[in-house]
Image (spheres, rainbow, N blue to C red):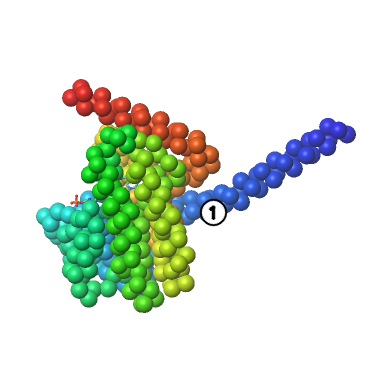
Amino acid sequence: MFCNIYTLALALLGFVVLLNFLYINFWGLLQLAHSILAPYFIAHEENTTLAKKYGSWALITGSTDGIGKAYATELAKRGINLILVSRNKEKLENTAREIESKYSVKTKIITADFSQGVKAIDIIKNELGSIEIGILVNNVGKQYEYPMYLEEVPEEDLWDIVNINVGAVTMMCRAFIKDMKKRGRGAIVNVSSGSELQPLPFMTVYAATKAYIKSFTTSLRYEYGEYGLTIQHLSPFFVNTKMNRFCERFQKTTYIVPDAEMYARYAVSTLGKQDKSTGYWCHGVQYFLAEIAPEWLRMHIGGQMNKFLRNEYLNKIKSS
Ligand SMILES: NC(=O)c1ccc[n+]([C@@H]2O[C@H](COP(=O)([O-])OP(=O)(O)OC[C@H]3O[C@@H](n4cnc5c(N)ncnc54)[C@H](OP(=O)(O)O)[C@@H]3O)[C@@H](O)[C@H]2O)c1
């Protein structure tokens, strides 16, 4: 009899724990399923849907390389005209030419350096004239050269990381959201990172800026949700771009580390469908699994991984 009650109590406890787990992770599971299936459900009319829904021009920051360039190309594939913004005029011209040769869209390039603060925003606003931005993709971001202790990161780099990852995203949103609100349509995509999930030793400041983007974007969505705007935050894990050049392992394309083109193909298909997403199915799996572990454990694993990558990088430098 005692044994039966004991067993029943344990079963009940297990059931409650399971319910709690499912409740907490249900949304994550839905997101995961969606990020895996989304690209297979792109209807033909999607080519015109984004333009109809948000407007015919998109502005993408950091669009001459990596995720920004691939994201811009995906938008062009869907008939969206592009404003490409980066620091290097020649790279911008080449990117614009490359995209226009493949897709019948208009492009305009703007040379601006987001480490310059509000000056960059003024340049962009002046250059745009009367062009209405329907989709704003705040993609530009700066990372450490390799995993470092805070004292080792050059002062200028630290300042730029905060200015670019936090300042530029905030001010770009402020610069365009008022017009979107007036028009009652528009989309803002803020590119964060899987490092938003928990503090990340040896990439401490970078991860902190991405936690800011997550908090900022979530809050902004609440503020402007009632005006019909889409405000999405994207949290990629590792993507094979020059940002990760410190690690050879991340310079090889795999399912876990996709190239920017593969990543963007998935990420753009979540626009207007998911408010927050990793943007790519395999990163959805990683995010889901990571969230199950407690924050201290995730931080510890991340810290140890970065320590390993740091030593690997420093040994490589020493021996070359
Ligand atoms: N790659 C990853 O594994 C990964 C993972 C998670 C999140 N992310 C995030 O994804 C975003 C894109 O990363 P990515 O890997 O594609 O980067 P990337 O390959 O290094 O490309 C960065 C782009 O930004 C431009 N840029 C850099 N500094 C700039 C500045 N001060 N002003 C204006 N433009 C600038 C670069 O062009 P110019 O140098 O010609 O100006 C380039 O077009 C970032 O926000 C990053 O944090 C990346």
Q: Is residue 7 left or right of residue 170?
A: right
Q: Secondary structure at mark 1?
A: helix
Q: Quick check: 2 left or right of 303?
A: right
37 w.r.t. 52: above or below: above
The residue at the point 43 percent across, 72 percent down is 228
Residue that sits furthest to the top in the current view: 319
Q: Quadrant of residue 61?
A: bottom left
Asked whether 42 or 117 is in front, the reply is 117
- Whether residue 28 appears in this view of the structure is yes
Residue 145: x %, y % from top left: 25, 38
Quadrant showing the C terminus: top left
Residue count near mark 1 (Cα–Cα under 10 Å), binned few <14, some 14–19, many ≥20: few
- Amino acid marked by disc 1: Trp
Is 271 or 99 nearer to us in this picture?
Answer: 271
Side of 281 relative to 262 (left or right): right
Compare residues 69 and 199 and report the one nearer the observer: 199
